[in-house]
Amino acid sequence: MSAIDIIEHPLGRLSLESLPFYKMSQDPTLQNLINGSIAGTAALIAVGGAVIVAGLITYFHGWRTLWSDWLTSTDHKKIGIMYVVIAFVMMARALIEAMLMRAQQAWGLGGGFLSPDHFAELFSTHGTIMIFFMAMPFLTGLINYVMPMQIGARDVSFPTLNSVSLGLTAAGAALIMVSLVLGSFSTGGWFGYPPYTEMAYSPGVGVDYWIWALSLSSLGSTFTGINFAVTIYKERAPGMKLMRMPLFTWTALCAAILMIFAMPPLTVATAQLALDRYLGFHYFTNALGGDPMHFVNLFWMFGHPEVYIIILPAWGVYSEVISTYSGKALFGYRSLVWATMAISVLSFTVWLHHFFTMGQNANINAVFGIASMLIGIPTGVKIYDWIWTMVRGRVRMTTPMVYSIGFILLFVLGGMTGILLANPSIDYQVHNTVFLVAHFHNVAVPGVLFGMLAGYHFWFPKAFGFRLNERWGIFSALCWIIGFMLAFFPLYVLGIMGLPRRSAGYQQAAYVPLEMVAFAGALVIGVALLALVIQLLVSIRDREQNRSPVGDPWDGRSLEWSTASPPPEHNFPVIPEVTNLDAFTVAKECGEAYQEPDEYVDITMPRNSILGPVLGIFGFVLAFALVWRIWWLVILATLATFVTIIVRGFARDLTETVSADDARREHQRLLERVRISPAISRDDERAPVNVGLAKQGPAKVVS
Amino acid sequence: MNEATHDSTEQTDRKREERREFHSYVWGVGLALILTLVPFALVAWTDIARQTLYIVIGVLALVQMVVHFRFFLHLGLRRKREDLHLILFSALLLVILVAGTIWIMTNLSVRMALPMMP
Amino acid sequence: MSRNYQNFQYPGLNLGSAHPEAHKAAESMMFGFWVFLMSDAILFGMVFATYVTQLHATAGGPGPQDLYDIKSVFIETMLLLASSFTFGMASLSMKYEHGKAQLIGWLTITLLLGLAFLGFEVHDFLSMIDKGGAPERSGFASAFFDLVPLHGLHVTAGCIWLLGLVGQMLRYGLDTRTKLGVMRLALFWHFLDIVWIAIFSVVYLAGLA
């Protein structure tokens, strides 16, 4: 780190050898050629994709729009959409990696075609991306888009901070993408246990990529959590008591609180690992009093609440979806709220079940085992509530509903295997086998991913003003469900047969048939991903037939459906008064929806800010420089970050005004549309005639 | 009631409030000083058994934290206050996480024959 | 909105009726900052937990008794306590509008106390390294150099922030945004003093007992 170092190695450890095909060109054995080609192709896709996107933007003269309407925007809706875009891009990459891994194992008898290191890199990026750069941005995006409208607010409490969170998350995602091209990613798994990830055993840049990508993302998530929690506490419309909030908002609140309190242990764990690696500290080393087990403990104090951070919002989506497409109020709203809160608190008391076999005594294992099983109770309550919501409802089998029902069936199975694993003595038998892999995918894929996709289909017409193609949607959903079952049910059996997780190869011929089935499942999931892409393209092509500008295509129940699609930047012409749960349904039934307010007033909205993208860029540069140990750049980026924050303190005049006239014009356009549009019944929900105005049945008494 | 007298009562109210709040800081510093001096003195100049000393230090530290919350951060028990709920929730989580960690890691140290805890 | 703005409180010194605009703007801002501090408290809690579990991992190197200096810690404690008081005076001076000069005066004294604290702390660290207690020496030394300098870094950040705020005051006077900045920094500063109570009790006093 001395001055001479900086002069002699201005690019730190960066060199030609960092390129993915370097090894192949120096030592062209067959295995090196295969691995080099795959890595090189991936790098080309990453670079080529970026170039193509940049080219398209240039071709359509989109840079100015991109910068001033999107990247610097502080509008919670646009930020939400950008989060979801990140999530989809990262999901595509992680799914391709998953298919590669299944292929490797299917042909893994005696070794497979990938090198063990390459395979290890694949499962490390797959896990890291799916948790931090797929699930987290997806749920953050959905909450960002929907939650402020559900509580009748104009934006989140801290719109600029929201944009900064997005910038940091994007920086983390970009860092992982860069690891495809320069150097390689960690081989230490998504939880990066030391001492393997210490300098002594992982001297390359991989672990550093992992550390800094996680740090950026967890900083962003902490800010997001604070933002959401304060928004829900402080920005609710008058009359929106806590017990009148839609369930999705409730889950958003609980997830936000978990983010606030669960991210610090991760920050501590990764920071200490970084100190070990960069400055020779001894937190987790084998020598001089370091204790690797301490990392495990810290990591899972974050890791377990993280499971609920990603799954609670998905459960919120299911609650909204099932109630809306059943045409019924949610069964047991109160019990769902209490179950959500109970799960949130319990999630902080079970972290040890991730390391039952580490060596602590049986009493500790028993305490945490029992606590883990307790979570099954509130979760069971929720499952019953969702089923009872559908009973005697007018259930429509739309795409989100297919996901939801698939979720209920599959998640119960995943939950059951979870109860098995919560028993330490059983855990001793199957830990570190693919049984565990099957279990957590069985809760994470139906529990989280299906929920996110259901939410994407559910709110897409709200965000863009037209509905997604249902045929492709249902086809994709069925592929997801069937592909999931094929890919992961065999792993339960393989796990009990003793196949260790993370094996690049194996010597037991008996594993092959089931591995082949699992690979077939991965292919079906690949088709599902493809179907999602086709669905989006087809829907954009046919958008004129699927327009729903009035904004309520599903006869929705909460306030976000009362706005036009897409909604104006200020969401509501005047802040609504809330008198009941399911505020919009009540308004529609009482004939109070789509009314002209008594008077319009000027609306204060946050201005655009370059702070988010600028801090995102500096964060990325700082992390990149740290990974490659380019010290002069580290110093420069740190200074730049500090200066930016200080200069920002001097910024004034941060709001702009939407005049009462503009708000009136905007709203009257919606009212005019309401007047001329046909109100449709639920039979025509998927027909072109559905422009987003729901026909009301005879008024029901709502308690 | 005319404007002038209204203003002047508000003035005296503000004066009184200012004095009260000033005294709050003075009380805070006074109490904190005592609560700091006592444990320092005990550690520096006495030979009390270590276990007893740990307890005394711990209790005094907790009391001093409450003093700071009360007199410097003006956190009271009156009215409905989200920040107070939040701090109690945070304290609960801190206890769970820190106590859990110490429990688990101490047990591991003993069973793995790592350097022993006291 | 039909909410009564006199009817809420936020952590720290409440500005009240004389600053209606700032008082109103403070509600979300101060609550949000308070939430951040709670997150930070968990961060410190985890680092404390690390320290306690690594306490005996000295690996044959020097331990607490060999490294800590009670006099220096006592001086640091007094400096920080005094700075909490002077920051309180700054808050009062702002709330009761004693003028910009007085406010900046109290803030400057606070800054000097903070810097003095940091000076003593750096001196402590250097002398520890001198005595063979550098962080690379053992798990225990690593844990110490995680916890105490983390607090020191927070204080440093607070000092930079304070300078930034004084700059804003000189540029814009006491507008709402500056007032909110001072109020948040006050929370931060008092919060760091509370963390210091835990540090001098758990690390230093318990270590020397």
Image (cartoon, coloured by chain):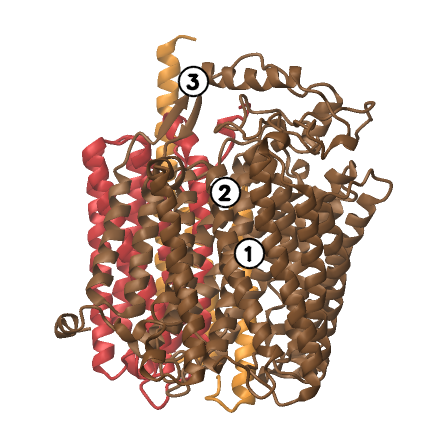
Residue C25 on image: x %, y %: 41, 32
Identify the image quadrant of the N terminus of chain A.
bottom left
Q: Colour of chain B?
A: orange
Secondary element at tag 3: loop
Whether residue B101 is visible to the viewer of this picture, yes or no, is yes
Chain to which mark 2 belongs: A
Q: Residue A694 is drawn in which quadrant?
A: top right
Mark 3 and 1 residues: CB-CB less than 8 Å, in contact?
Answer: no
Q: Amino acid at mark 2?
A: Ile
Q: Amino acid at mark 1?
A: Ala
Front one among B72 and B102: B102
Mark 2 and 1 residues: CB-CB less than 8 Å, in contact?
Answer: no
Residue A437 on image: x %, y %: 63, 72
Secondary element at tag 1: helix
In the rendered structure, find residue A135 and report the number of the disc placed on it.
1
Looking at the rendered image, the disc whose residue lies closer to the viewer, 3 or 2, is 2
Q: Are marks 3 and 2 on the same chain?
A: yes
Residue A274 on image: x %, y %: 36, 71
Chain to which mark 1 belongs: A
Chain identity for the colour brown used in the image? A
Chain to which mark 3 belongs: A
Q: Look at mark 2 in the image and give the residue it sits on.
A: A81
Q: Residue A283 is drawn in which quadrant?
A: bottom left
In whole angstroms, how far apart are the C-alphas of marks 3 and 2?
26 Å
Chain identity for the colour red used in the image? C
Mark 3 and 2 residues: CB-CB less than 8 Å, in contact?
Answer: no
For this orientation, the residue located farthest to the right is: A392
Identify the image quadrant of the C terminus of chain A.
top right
Secondary element at tag 2: helix
C127 relative to A344, above or below? below
Q: Look at mark 3 in the image and give the residue it sits on.
A: A659
Looking at the rendered image, the disc whose residue lies closer to the viewer, 3 or 1, is 1
